[in-house]
Image (cartoon, rainbow, N blue to C red):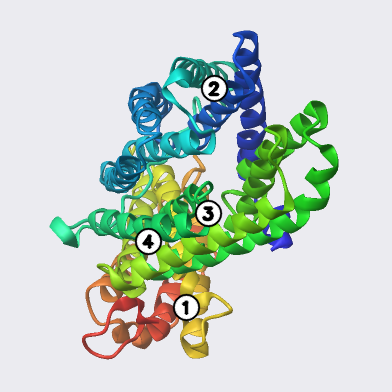
Amino acid sequence: MLRKVFMAQDPGRTRLRFAARAVVGIGLAVAVCGLAGHSLVGAVTGGLAALLALFTVTDPTVRGQALTTALLPAVGLPVLALAAGLHDRPTARDLAFLAVVGAGVYARRWGPRGHSLGVFAFMTFFVAQFLHATTDRLPELSAAVVLSVLTAAGVRFGLWCYERGRPSVPQPAAPGGTGLRRVTTRQAVQATAGAGFALVVGQAVSGERWYWAVGAAWWIFVNTTSRGETLVRGFRRVLGTVIGIGLGLPLVAPLHGAAVPTAALLAVCVFGIFYTAAVSYTWMMLWVTLLAELLYGLLGVFTPGLLALRIAETAVGALGAGLAVLLVLPVTTHAITHAWIERALRCVHACTAEAAARLAGAPDADPAPRVAELEQLLGRVRLSVAPLVHPLNPMAGRRRRARRVLALLDDCAREVRGLVAVAADPEASHDARLAAACWRVETAVEALTGGDARDLAAHPAHTPATEPALAHLHGLERALAELAAPLRTPPGARLADA
């Protein structure tokens, strides 16, 4: 786990910039709230709003990110008013919270913007419970949200917009469908059911901190699409929380809420959350737990008993999410993995075709965006296959085959990147053998995604090629041919049964 976090590749230092900008943006947002005369509760609200604005907005273009950021207060302020207004009416408050959960997950059907707005709406209601927001505090908290989002936007789009000028990378949409066949619709029902279980049991555990269980159930559903992904994420959330509490108790308790050292450690936690989010959910949850402990110390309510309660509520939320994905409209791991692998293979073909066209002299052929799309799709494949390759998976044969599939897909990606690098060379010339090699790649992809993968095993080995583009194409063919073995399944079985 340590190696995964600290030795993971960071092309262009993107994760480092992402984390450093978050520290600057959130720090400035809290400072602005302080200069505006807000109380500690208002400053905490503003800091959390800035964190969400910098973390959850993931539109593929800078312009889209700016529009989504501008819409955050329009969604968050009505939810904040609703939560504050229902503070003393528990039944109505609970029903409203569950409605926000369902709507927030359902909004994912509209892509990254719907996802961002749904997360912001949920977290606004959650923060209102965290800070015991009432209507008399509503003007201050609303002003803190607006000021902090504006400050975060100023840092992201003005002071440090490292994304400007880079090609946009659209995030792959979840598998589609209609009605209850749509994954986002099924997940909305699952999340509402899981959050309902967490709310009821969480209140039985603690009438004051019950919202922790609902928050745990919610975040387990974020960025997952299948039953297996959700269960693995729940395990990692509990693990990260336990480790974070174990580290935080001796670290936070001696501070007694002292402002300066607490602020310094909060900055470290923010950096850790943003830097590790892309590579390890366990580590991200460790930093989130430490941040929550520091905030409770700052608010003067930190105790060892509170930490034990957090573990219990997190476990309740994870149990609620697990029961929901197993019993309520389950989305199988195999079905989702099948869809992502097929899309990744088709993207391999598209990358190859664009590169071949570029080498043939087509001026408008540009394989670079396809390569970026392939990286996104492979990330989704890894996430979907994670339950199959997890060490706790008792089916060793299936685990080995799934790892083989991942390794061969990585080989495909490496050959595609090499081919695209050759195509980008202005001195690279077209070789007549490229057309034949690209046709064979197309045939291989069709066999794997829609035909009979067993036909690939009969393809003869090609003689070594000295021309770089052909060498990469032959390497791609070999990887696709080898994929036939782990993907070969009995008639009627899904592609991803491996």
Q: Amino acid at mark 1?
A: Ala
State the CA–CA distance, disc 3 to disc 4: 14 Å
> Mark 2 to mark 1: distance in Å?
41 Å
Instruction: Give me the C-alpha separation between circle 2 and circle 3.
Output: 34 Å
**Which element carries disc 3, helix, strand or loop?**
loop
Which residue is under mark 3? 206
Q: Classify 10 Å Cα crowding around label 1: few (below 14), some (14-19), many (20 and above).
A: many
Give the x, y percent position of residue 283. Answer: 65, 55
Query: In the image, is 448 to the left or to the right of 206?
Result: left
Marks 3 and 2: in contact by CB < 8 Å?
no
- Whether residue 467 is visible here, answered yes or no, is no
Q: Is residue 22 above or below residue 414?
A: above
Q: Earlier in the sequence, mark 1 or mark 4?
A: 4
Residue 131 in which image quadrant: top right
Provide the residue designation for mark 2: 152
Residue 218, x across and y down, in percent: 42, 52
The answer to whether any part of residue 16 appears in the image is yes
| Residue at 50 percent of width and 54 percent of height | 417
State the image coordinates of residue 471 (x, y, percent, origin top left): 51, 65
Query: The disc labelled 3 sits on which kind of residue?
Result: Ser
